[in-house]
Every structure is written in C-alpha cells, then in structure tokens.
Amino acid sequence: MLFSTLCGFLVVGKTLAQSNTVDAYVASQSPLAKAGLLANIGPSGSKSMGAKSGIVVASPSNVNPDYLYTWTRDSALVFQTIIDQFSLSIDTNTRGEIDNYVAAQAIIQQVSNPSGTITTGGLGEPKFNIDETAFTGAWGQSPSTRCALRVSDGPALRSIALITWANFLLTEGNTSYVTNTLWPLIQNDLNYVAQNWNQSTFDLWEEVDSSSFFTTAIQHRSLRQGVQLANTIGQTSVVSSWTAQAGNLLCFLQSYWNTAGYITANTGGGRSGKDANTVLASIHTFDAAAGCDALTFQPCSDVALSNLLTYVNAFRSVYSINSGLANNAAAATGRYPEDSYMGGNPWYLTTLAVSEQLYDSLIVWNQQKSLNVTSLSLPFFQLFDASVTVGTYTSTSSTFTTLTTGVKTFADGFVATVAKYTPSSGSLSEQYSKSDGSPLSATDLTWSYAATLTSFDARAGLVPTSWGAKGLTSSCGISTGGGGGSSSGTVSVTFNVDATTVFGENIYICGSVDALQNWDPDTALILSAATYPIWSITVNLPASTQVQYKYIRKFGSSLTWESDPNDVINTPSGGSFIENDTWR
Ligand code: NOJ
Ligand code: NOJ
C-alpha cells in the first residue's frame, strides 16, 4: 500500500516535471520556430538566399545536402501552417506572405519542366529553382538528363492550402479574388489530381514509385474540399467528375490497411511498410467533425492508433538513443525503420507528427466526452492501463481519465524528445543523430519549423477547419460515374487484388464474359505485379452488366481457384470503375 502510493506519487511527479519541461519548450520554441520558418521565405527572409517573392526554400543548406530549392510539398505544408494560423487568428501578420505565395504558385504552375507543361504532367515535378525556373539537373538515382517524374502529393497539398485560404476570404466577402485568382490555380491542381491519382507516383520521400498512402489520403481530401468550394462559388462543372474520383480514392485508401494491424505506406518498395507517411497522412487529413472515423483514418480511429503504435515501436531497436526506454515511453522516430539516407536517423518532423496525432485524438475525445477502445486499439490503450478492456468510456469514468492522462503524457514525451535534442539556439535541422541526438542533415529545415507549430497548436487544442470527412461512406467497387473514357457500351474496369505470392507464382483473372475469357482458366488474363502485393489489370467490360469473376493463382503447373462464391460486380453505364479485392 505504502509502496504503491509512493510509486504513484513518483509517477505523478515525473509526469508533472515532463509537462513543465514541455510547457517551457513550447513557450521558448514557438517564436523561434515561427521566425525560423519566415526566415526561409523570399524575398526578404533572412535565410531565403535570394529566393523570389513568396518562394519557400526547403532549407538554406546548399551542400550535403543541397536543399536550396523550392519543393511544392514543403511549401504547401509551410503555407498551410501560416494560413491555418491566420484563419484561427493566432498570427494575422502574414497576409503579405500569403499573397506572395499565391502569386508565386501562379508562376510556378506555368513553368514547363522536364515532367511537362501544365497540361502534360508538369505539375508532378517535385521541385523548382528558387528563381522560379525549372530544375533540369539529376534527380534521385536518375542520370543528369532525365525524363518526367510524377510526384503527385504536391498539387493536392497546394490546392488544400489555397482552398483553406479561399474559405477564409469568403468569410470576408472577397468572392471575386477567390473566383478570379485562386480558383483557376485550384482547378489546375485538382484536375491533375482527378486525372492522375490512379497512376503510379513517387512517395513523399521521393524514393518509391508505386501508390502511396499519404498521397492517396491527401488527394482524397483535396478533391472533397475542392467540390465544397466549387459548390460554394458556383463552379459546378467540375463537381461530378471530382466527386466520382474522390469516391474512387476513398475506396482505394482502404486497400493500404493490412491485417497485421497497420497501414502499409506504399504498394511498392519492398519494405515493412511502417512509415511516418501514414502518421503524416492522419494529421494532415484531421477533421475534428468526423470524430474517430476509421474510413478516413482519423487520428483517434482504432486503425490509426494501432498503426501509430506499430510505427513507433518499429524504431525502438534501430536507434541507440532509444535504448533502455520503457515500451510505453515516447521514443525518437524517423521516416521508416529501413531508412539509410544520411545514415538513417530520426527526424524532428516525424517525431512531432506522432505527438500531433495524439493531441488531435485528445481534442476529439474531450469534445465528444467519450473514448472507444476496440480490439484493434486495445494494445495501444494498454500502454496506459494494462487492465483496460474493450468498451466505451465516458468522460465521467476513471478509465477515461487514466487513458487520456496517459495519452497526454505519451504525446508530451515525443515533444520532450524533440526538446531534448534541440540545440540551445532553437535551430531545427532535418534529422538528429540516432546515436547522440545531435542535429544532422539540412540545417533550418522549413518543414521542421512548420511541424513544430502545428504540433504546438494541436497541443493547445486548436482545431483546423473541417474539410468534409464527416459522414462519408465507402463506395468500394461502385463507381459513381463521371471521369474517364468509355466507348460504345464498354467500361474500363481496373481489378486490384491484394494477394501475397511466392516468387514465380502469378495471379490471373477469368469470369463470365468474353473479355474475361468465359471462365476458361487456361486462357485467364495475367495481372501485373508492378504494385505488389496489389496485382492489377484493366479490361474493357460491357456497361450496365452483372459480371462474375474469380482470381486464380498459378505456380508452375499448379492452379488454384479462389474459394467460393464467385465475385460479382455490376458495371456502371459509363466512365471507369475500380474494383479493390483481397485474395480469398
Ligand atoms: C527530402 C524529403 O524526403 C522530402 O520529403 C522533402 O520534400 C525534401 N527533402 C525537401 O525538404
Ligand atoms: C512478381 C513475380 O512475378 C511473382 O512471381 C512474385 O510472386 C511477385 N513479384 C512477388 O515477389
């Protein structure tokens, strides 16, 4: 009794001490982070190195690594932070910067580059020179003369920042600027998203060319928000096609979930799939109005919490600064455990993202005055109460208090980790050493500062505006029509099937119509493994028809049908259609 009381006292004491440390860090680091972020924006930012007006440099570092470029991704995330803070009246001194950003993006969108022009894929180019000219040098592993890239999160992120700004301006009654200046830019980006989302893309780390959870989640949000704005300002011609593609994206989003209890970040890449990609997706698609909705992987959904636990635990044994930490203590985290870039270290922005997902969750639980523990999120909640069981706990229960207090301490622990490894100047680079926590890689990474501010704002309970995640239902396998080419009574149907195979084994499809070989397994159509473990094929099927089919596995001379019953789809009357399946 005395012992447990004493232990309880010590734990409370430790928690209080950490909370005070984090309070102090938030107070000192907030202004430094804001100043660090603004310093990297041209033309007058003190570290913007000659960048044009409204251009964000990723980092002033111009050697090892050379980040003296403007990335569409980084810039959009930085301005999302600035615009959110402006709209929430946290900082309204940045109107000039925001106007400059808009003007700069209007120029950047039109710059033809090795990926194409604005209408032929140029929006997928990941970065530009800081004088707003195209970057024509080598990229990644490609030779110095290179072809097109497709890095499709950039246009989606940019459109979300611009829509957020548009929504604020509409509250001021500034419809003409929204319609005449912002809308054309938003439309360029969202038409690109609607047309390209189903193509392969490099992930946000620009390493894996496949499909990527972060990109899919952001694209989905961008089209939903685009549709809302279009309806508000009467630009309704885009509504049906963007709505249809948003439905397809929401459907495709579900396919990244894997039964091991986490989100596989990329369909390609041959890694564990445990990746900050998924945590960043959750915080950047947070919509408090949607509660703990699992369909959109909201921060407090059981899928996102189970994923968070898996992601964090993946770093416990790979960084020596994490050694000796309790399994319910916060830890340093990086992009993905297999990372070797610059030695493969924790990143400030990924560690902060974990804290932000947890702060976002607390916002929702406190708002709805209850919290739900499911069998999927049970291991997460057991970190804070080993005896907790599946159930719903209202805010008057002691379990609610125990769990939310535990989550807050855990969240603060990630900020405390960042605080511990922030140099006294407050300057944040990209990474910190896995062996001693000292700053590494690009100095003054603008994105690190933005990640600091968004985490702190979430800790303070600030809620970014809703984007329409509430009440969505999945239309998996059912096209809502609209986008894509059909011809003379046929519909282009993409079959994706999640199937784990052994090397040399392949997946085929056959079914009840001519185009699916009339159930003949010997002539069944082979699927592509380019996005393994998703096997994929696109075929033209008769429109408005019920089609039955099955997948087949062939390995040498052995042939295995899927178990019964037959799969069935009802093809739409036109457009294109995506069917996502799992082998059974
Ligand atoms: C490398 C990161 O992987 C990428 O996401 C980022 O856009 C650039 N650095 C610039 O910060
Ligand atoms: C493609 C190969 O063709 C297939 O046999 C294998 O199962 C998958 N890659 C996964 O390794």
Image (cartoon, rainbow, N blue to C red):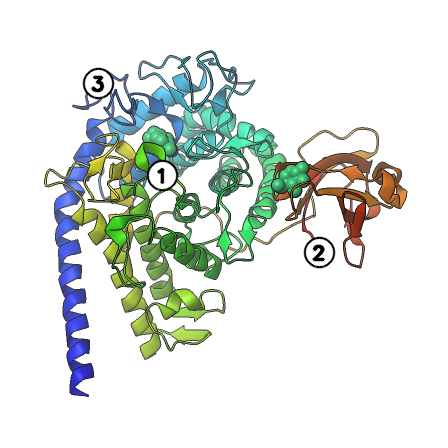
Asked if disc 1 and disc 2 are in contact, CB closer than 8 Å, the reply is no
Residue nearest the observer in this picture, 327 or 198: 327
Contact, CB < 8 Å: mark 1 with mark 3? Answer: no
For residue 168, the mark is 1
Judge the density around disc 2: few (<14), some (14-19), many (≥20) Cα neighbours within 10 Å.
Answer: few
Q: Amino acid at mark 3?
A: Met
Q: Quadrant of ligand 1?
A: top left
Residue that label 3 marks: 49
Say which of marks 2 and 3 sits in front: 2
Q: Is residue 200 left or right of residue 501?
A: left
As shown in the figure, which amino acid type bears the numbered disc 1?
Phe
Cα–Cα gap, marks 2 and 3: 56 Å
Residue 72 drawn at (x, y percent): 39, 27
- Point out the residue furthest to the front here: 556
* Alpha carbon separation for disc pair 1 and 2: 48 Å
Q: Which residue is mark 2?
A: 584
Occupied quadrant, residue 326: bottom left
**Mark toward the viewer: 1 or 3:** 3
- Dot placed on the residue nearer the N-terminal end, 1 or 3: 3
Is the residue indicated by label 1 positioned so its CB lies within 8 Å of ligand 1? no
Tell me where residue 511 sits by quadrant: top right
**Type of the residue with mark 2:** Arg
Q: Is residue 93 above or below residue 552?
A: above
Task: Assign a secondary structure to mark 1.
Answer: helix
